[in-house]
Amino acid sequence: MSAYQELEKLATAHAMEAIRLDRQGARGMAITMYQKAIETLLKLVHLYPDYGLNQVYIQRAMAYQERIKVLQIGSPAEPVGETQSGGTTETPQKLDKASYDELVLKEKPCVKWDEVVGLEAAKRAVKEAIVYPVSRPDLFPLGWPRGILLFGPPGCGKTLLAAAVATEIDANFISVDAASIMSKWLGEAEQNVARLFNSARKSADNGRPAIVFIDELDSLIGVHSNEVGGETRVRNQFLKEMDGVIDKGRNIHVYVIGATNKPWDLDWPFIRRFQKRILVPLPDHHSRLSMFKQYTTNLHLESDVDLHKLASLSEGFSGSDIRDMCQSAHLKVIGEFFESGQANNKKAQPRHLSMDDFKHILEERKSSVSPKMLEMYNQWFEAFKAL
């Protein structure tokens, strides 16, 4: 066992002992063990500053520190989790439950297909894999794909596409991020993965399709040079659960949609479990024009604003870049309005946005996606595409 694994094992032991003592009401000893867990986690971060899970370890240390504060404030005579006013504090059990509940989107997405501008090839592929089988499963004697990988530059609509599919089929939409899955509490990550997929299967068994959406997939199941025990167990659990979804009969409507900006970082065992691998590219001229129309609908524009020209000038911009550009131009005008002192007059209004305003933003803002990145996406697409 490596030194890193030894430290991780020690941190786990301290944390579990702290939680056990906390539940028993042994506040003083629990605080001591929480402090030891924090010290070990911070030592991990200090000795291995480049490791990908350091942010998660820092979050855990902060969570333990917050628990220590709660224990120090509470009266020794009070049971753990109760206050003199009759309210409750966050016990370890409740913190664990909260960390899992963060995985599930409380409000159902309400994104329509027409809100996903462009991306016709990606939309068609997703409809074939999910929407059509849900609508008429009897037409699919060979079954249908249940693993869909969306990859491409950041800000191009991967999350929006997944939300639109969930709305279209009225699915239970379960959103996952690496920090939540790895959990604030050491040792709970595998259980959270199993609980996640069990929830999805239960939803499907009750007649409602389920979509497990994993954002930034590479940070959770990518290839790592310094992989440690906890991360390996989570990856293995994910493989096991995905195999269960893919192989468990032909009629189950549980879908795993993974989104990543770094498909080249994914490990091959996971790549092959996504039967559909779909490039979500930068918007073309027509899509950029539609985005400018959409984002300027509620803005007051001068007659000289040429959206077609802006669509041409913004070649290489992502959808997120275009939205930020429109927002920046609007903020510039609003800033001028406030600085002029006219905002004190409730009847006064800011001037309309001009073409020069947009051109000024274009001079100060470049695309967030470089030509080198685009080349990498296209190369990976040619090597692994599965539409």
Image: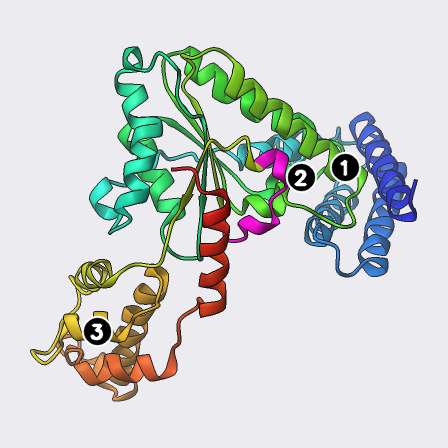
Residue found 50% across the figure and 43% down from its top: 384
Residue occupying the far front of the picture: 383
* Residue 86 can be seen in this image: yes
Residue 72 placement, left or right of 138: right
Give the x, y percent position of residue 234.
69, 33
Q: Nearer the viewer, mark 3 or mark 2?
A: 3
Q: Quadrant of residue 131?
A: top left
For the N terminus, the image quarter is: top right
**Lateral position of residue 15 relative to residue 81, left or right:** right
Question: Where residue 361 appears, x then y in whole percent?
Answer: 31, 80
Which residue is found at the position 67% from the left and 34% from the top?
Answer: 235
The region drawn magenta spans 261-270
Separation of disc 2 and disc 1 at Cα? 9 Å
Give the mark nearer the N terminus: 3 vs 1.
Answer: 1
Q: State the mark number for residue 230.
A: 1
Disc 1 residue type? Answer: Gly
Q: Nearer the viewer, residue 35 or 143?
A: 143
Disc 3 residue type (three-letter): Leu
Q: Which mark is residue 182?
A: 2
Prevailing secondary structure of the magenta residues: helix
Q: Residue furthest left?
A: 303
Q: Is residue 258 left or right of residue 181?
A: left
Q: How is the image coloured?
A: rainbow
The residue labelled by disc 3 is 310
Q: Split into 4 quadrants, where in the image is the C terminus?
A: top left
